[in-house]
Image: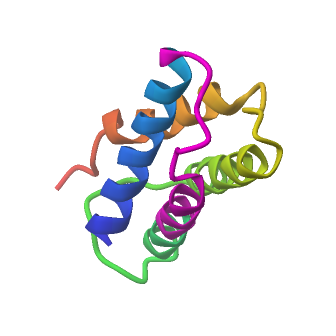
Amino acid sequence: MAEALSGGLNCASAIVEALDVGPPGADLPMDEWVGTLRAMGDALEAILAKEVTTALIVHQGDCDVARRLAALVSDWATTRQPPHELRAVAVAVLRLSNRGEAEP
């Protein structure tokens, strides 16, 4: 669970970095990122469904934004052009790590 969340955050960070550096090259691991982001979405869904116990607060919107980022990266891999909203959605995923945890 933690590995999937961490992996998704790392992907989001790498996406923002790749977009900020300039025109992204074809050598980016987009297919790997899609799988990692889908795993993150699955992990968030499991937390939301209370299939696992954690102090992390998860809302349906968190699951949706992780899945949206995976879809955008998939589109990017297909078209070789980053979708307009890609960076904003990646930043939204990164914000998930800055939101607090449930009070004990």
Q: Position of residue 54 (x, y in %)?
A: 27, 67
Q: In this view, does 22 lie above or below 1?
A: above
Task: In the rendered view, tell whether residue 100 sits above or below residue 66.
Answer: above
Q: Which of 58 and 74 is in front in this view?
A: 74
| Magenta stretch contains residue 92 | no
Q: Position of residue 73 (x, y in %)?
A: 67, 48
* Rendered residue at 54%/53% (across/down): 59
Q: Is residue 50 above or below residue 85?
A: below
Q: Residue at x 28, y 66 (%)?
A: 3
- Report whether 70 appears left or right of 100: right
Q: What stretch is highlighted in magenta?
A: 21-40
| Callout count | 0
Horizontal and vertical percent position of residue 60 = 62, 56
* Quadrant of the frame with the N terminus: bottom left
**Image-based side of 66 in relation to 48, left or right:** right
Q: Where is residue 95 in the image (x, y as percent from the top left)?
A: 43, 33
Please name the residue shown 77% across and 33% down the image.
81
Q: Is residue 71 above or below residue 98?
A: below
Q: In which quarter of the image is residue 87?
A: top right
Q: Nearer the viewer, residue 64 or 86?
A: 86
